[in-house]
């Protein structure tokens, strides 16, 4: 039991040491990549206000079998 406790304490101390060493570097790289992505988005030309861009094929108008059935209802108070 004593051996297990000593190994557990050593592992916890080692993990804390590794986190202190490597965590700041990992966080810096993540923030710098996020900052670069933000700069790229800001540099892209913006579309003028009111412009519309549609992708895909237009839907055909007409009767559809999968629209369901219309049910009239009355509001009850």
Image (spheres, rainbow, N blue to C red):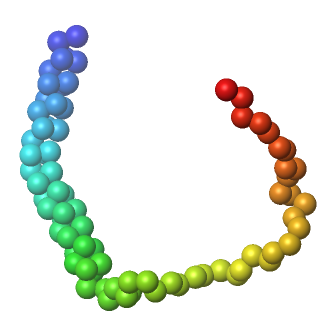
Q: Position of residue 7 (x, y in %)?
A: 18, 25
Q: Is residue 36 above or below residue 23?
A: below
| Image position, residue 51 (x, y; %) | 46, 86
For image coordinates 65% across by 80% down, the residue present is 56
In this rendered view, identify the residue nearer to me: 52 or 39: 52
Residue 76, picture quadrant: top right
In the picture, measured across the screen, residue 1 lies left or right of residue 24, that is: right
The residue at 88%/67% (across/down) is 63
The vertical placement of 37 against 5, above or below, is below
Task: Tell me what residue is drawn at x 18 percent, y 63 percent.
Answer: 31
Q: Is residue 49 left or right of residue 68?
A: left
Q: Residue at x 17, y 38 (%)?
A: 15
| Image: 13 above or below 59 | above
Q: Which one is nearer the viewer's eye here, 76 or 38?
A: 76
Which quarter of the rendered picture does the N terminus lie within?
top left
Q: Position of residue 10 (x, y in %)?
A: 13, 29
Q: Residue furthest top?
A: 1
């Amino acid at each position: 039991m004593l051996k297990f406790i000593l190994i557990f304490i050593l592992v916890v101390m080692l993990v804390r040491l590794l986190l202190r060493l490597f965590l700041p570097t990992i966080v810096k790289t993540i923030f710098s990549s996020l900052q670069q992505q933000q700069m790229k988005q800001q540099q892209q030309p913006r579309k003028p206000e009111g412009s519309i861009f549609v992708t895909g094929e237009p839907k055909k108008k007409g009767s559809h079998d999968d629209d369901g059935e219309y049910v009239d209802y009355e509001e009850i108070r």
